[in-house]
Image (cartoon, coloured by chain):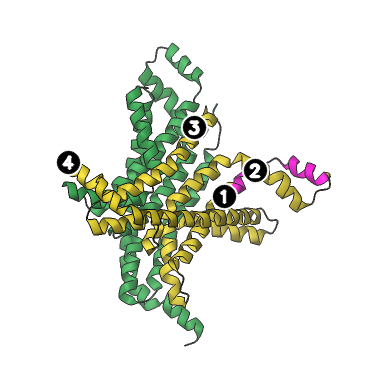
Amino acid sequence: MTPLERFVDTFLNPRLMARYWPDIAQGMLVTVEIALAVVVTGVALGLGLAVLRSYRVRPVNALIVVFVDVFRALPPLVLILIIYFGLPNIGVNLSSYAVLWLVLSLVLGAFAEEIFWAGILSVRKGQWDAARSTGLGFGRTLLYVVLPQAVRLAVPPLTNRTIAITKNTALGTVIGVAEIINQAQTAVSFSGNATPLMMGAVAYILVFIPVVLIGAHVERRFAWRRA
Amino acid sequence: MDVFLHQFLNLEIMRQAWPIIFKGLQMTALLCLAVIPLGLMGGLVLASASLSRRAVLRGAVKGLIDLFRALPPLVLLILIYSGLPFAGLNLSPFAAVCLAFTLNTSSFYGEIYRAGIESIGHGQWEAARSTGLGAGHTFAHVILPQAVRNVLPDLVSNTVEVVKLTSIASVVSFTELLYAADMARSVTFNTSPIVLAAAIYLVLLWPVVRLMSRLEHRVAA
């Protein structure tokens, strides 16, 4: 075998590609499903907490700040291990999928709260005063006047953060979630060949390059300052 | 409640695990000391290349940055750690981790520098060049200091992410903080060592996180 043939045989072996692509595709599906679930619950949690925080109830806000700080400071893998290995010991059994979804949702929720809150703060006080003077109550002012402006400001940083956190779905492999890299590693250990790893890398690129490009587009599209 | 305390905040087990966790902490520090400067330098190289006048170089760098931003760091690490041996290259866990994290963090630092450099008005270039400074000196002494000041919060925030990132090195058996804690967990069947590791990350990073959110709110307000 020439060196080139050996390289192709080890990294781009067509026979193994044909054999393992269903597994990798299955892994892509799992990655996309968990990522979407995390985006929905994480962003909703962040928005909910930011709204709650704007009522400025001191003890509640202190709790929110502690939650946000802790989940921004801790590496997600540490949280995954604590919950996955810790909860069964106190009688709560969650599947590895549920643990991954829960942890990443909490982490995204923490970052999203911070971003939405910065957005809410950046809406000028005059907007509040004007809305209240037309007879809108606090809740309606927040919902109809402040949030629409705050959310627009939040979109670019939130997009970046969301992409970064959905990529953490790969951490699921550590606790046995059968996502892309997990399927690839299993295939490598069965076949003794690096081809499935390359397939896994390509699968991630197929999933995330469009997301990164859409993110860059969104960032440009929403890049306007407050009125 | 007792069960919870016993499982998560068992001081006796934390005390026993402390020596190996402290060793892990030292390895985490070593890793940070290697990866953060490498990433900062790599990012600078990528940023200056992405501002080059040669379209081919610009395009290539842009492609590389997008590629390394799209690949989850864990995937890049596994690719390097388990993939390269098939090509006859055996890297130690430390070398593999440094290589993977440098590629990943350089891309993120590079994008931040680029945003900073683009935020400096063209007049600064022209003014500096007209005083007789060469292109290199202009970049190093006029543009870069202002650019870095403009994006300092982003650089700090990305550095926090790098420190958190080092926990992933545990997956390829590099004996850093989380790996040490997980080893202690698997020996004691108790989650407390990982809670201790979490507490250490928290002590290291919480002050920075707090500082960042104050900076962000000040900019926003």
Q: CA distance from mark 4 to mark 2?
A: 54 Å
Please give the letter of the chain rendered in green. Answer: A
- The tag on residue B131 is none
When asked about the image quadrant of residue A30, the answer is bottom left
> Horizontal and vertical percent for residue B147?
65, 43
What residue is drawn where x is 43% and y is 31%?
A117
Q: CA distance from mark 4 to mark 1?
A: 49 Å
Chain of residue at mark 2:
B
Label 4 Cα neighbours within 10 Å, binned few <14 / some 14-19 / many ≥20: few
Q: Is residue A47 magenta?
A: no
What residue is drawn where x is 44% and y is 24%?
A146
Q: Which amino acid, by three-letter code, is at mark 3? A: Arg
- The tag on residue B147 is 2
Q: Quadrant of the C terminus of chain A?
A: top right
Please give the letter of the chain rendered in yellow. Answer: B
Residue sitting nearer the eye, B146 or B184: B184
Could one spot residue B88 in this view of the protein?
A: yes
Q: CA distance from mark 3 to mark 1?
A: 23 Å
Chain of residue at mark 4:
B
- The tag on residue B2 is 4
N-terminal of the two: label 1 or label 2? 1
